[in-house]
Amino acid sequence: MSKRLEETVKAIKPLDKVMMEEVRKYQDTLTKPTGSLGRLEEISIQVAGITGKKTPDFGKKAVVVMAGDHGVVAEGVSAFPQVVTQQMVYNFANGGAAINVLARQAGAEVKVVDIGVAGDVEVPGVWVRKVKYGTNNFCQGPAMSKEEAIQALEVGIDVAEELIEDGFSILATGEMGIGNTTASSAIVSLLTGCTVEEAVGPGTGVDNEGIKRKINAIKRGIEVNKPDVNDALDVLMKVGGLEIAGITGLILGAAANRVPVVIDGFISTAAALVAKGLAPESVNYMIGSHCSAEPAHRRSLEILGIKPVLDLKMRLGEGTGAVLTFYLIESAVRIVKEMATFESAGVATKE
């Protein structure tokens, strides 16, 4: 671990239990049966613990789309060619992707980071923080060096801190990278203990033969690299991705600054598993958005102890599920801020 990474991990503190208890008790004074707003009440309590504030203001919201390519696409693991990563970065920058549409509706900004796209990206609005031009094919050796993995983690930390300094008070994880469900499945298999077969899904929509290629590629990658399942950084560098490392760093950076980070789908959850391995306390700063159609996503969330708010059978990525969840988080906070108490409304409490 680098000094920067160590300092970030050490800065992640437990949630504010006093504020959580204050909001929990206050929820019971509002004009509703105790616990009747379910997950909204849980979210408001968690957010209070994260921020140390009873009703934090989420005026500036950002979804960070980390973009990077994967050498393992050479093994035929994706239904789309690698160049699509670069093309989609341009689409994000031009506002034409699904995440742009949903972010506009949610009043959130899309921040696109080129952390490892295989080609040069020259377009206004994209943060070029390239560590390298895509990972290596992990079937032939580590996806990246330890130094590259740490650099990518630090990019994520830097992005989180820059956004927070600019006034963004809630962040969401997003990604783009052809081949990244293969890397994520490898990470999930290693860090959750499930079999490779259980961890692999259709990703971009590969057929049964494509799924077999993904399984075989991951098994070969694990055999060649022998990742240490007790060392999340070792797993990340050997079978992970640059954008996955960037998301991991973003999570750690948000947690170190007591800012909620909304976790998107399968790829983001693989990054969350790495973040937990590096800094167990970081999990408490994560808010799960949705459970994707990827088979191992639910298992990964369960191991993290994160309950998804939505189940829309989505598997697009980009941060789409996370941005949809912004509405619910803001609703949870507004309930505490705006709803009348039994006393203020003159409503009788139960006997």
Image (cartoon, rainbow, N blue to C red):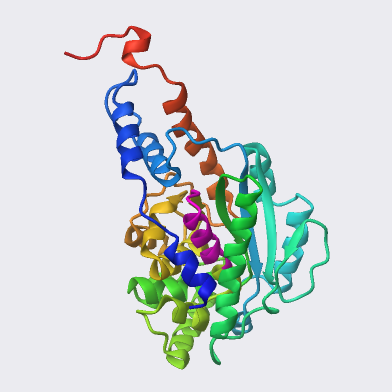
Q: x, y (%) of residue 44?
A: 40, 37
Q: Is residue 204 visible?
A: no
Q: x, y (%) of residue 135?
A: 62, 81
Location of residue 123 (image quadrant):
bottom right
> Would residue 251 be counted in the magenta stretch?
yes
Residue under the point 55% across and 61% down: 250
Q: Is residue 296 left or right of residue 97?
A: left
**215 or 16: nearer the eye?**
16
> Would residue 69 be counted in the magenta stretch?
no
Query: Image height check: is 56 above or below 171?
Result: above
**33 or 166: nearer the eye?**
166
Magenta extent? 246-260
Q: Is residue 217 left or right of residue 36?
A: right
Residue under the point 75% across and 50% down: 96
Q: Is residue 319 visible?
A: yes
Location of residue 125 (image quadrant):
bottom right
Q: Is residue 264 left or right of residue 48?
A: right
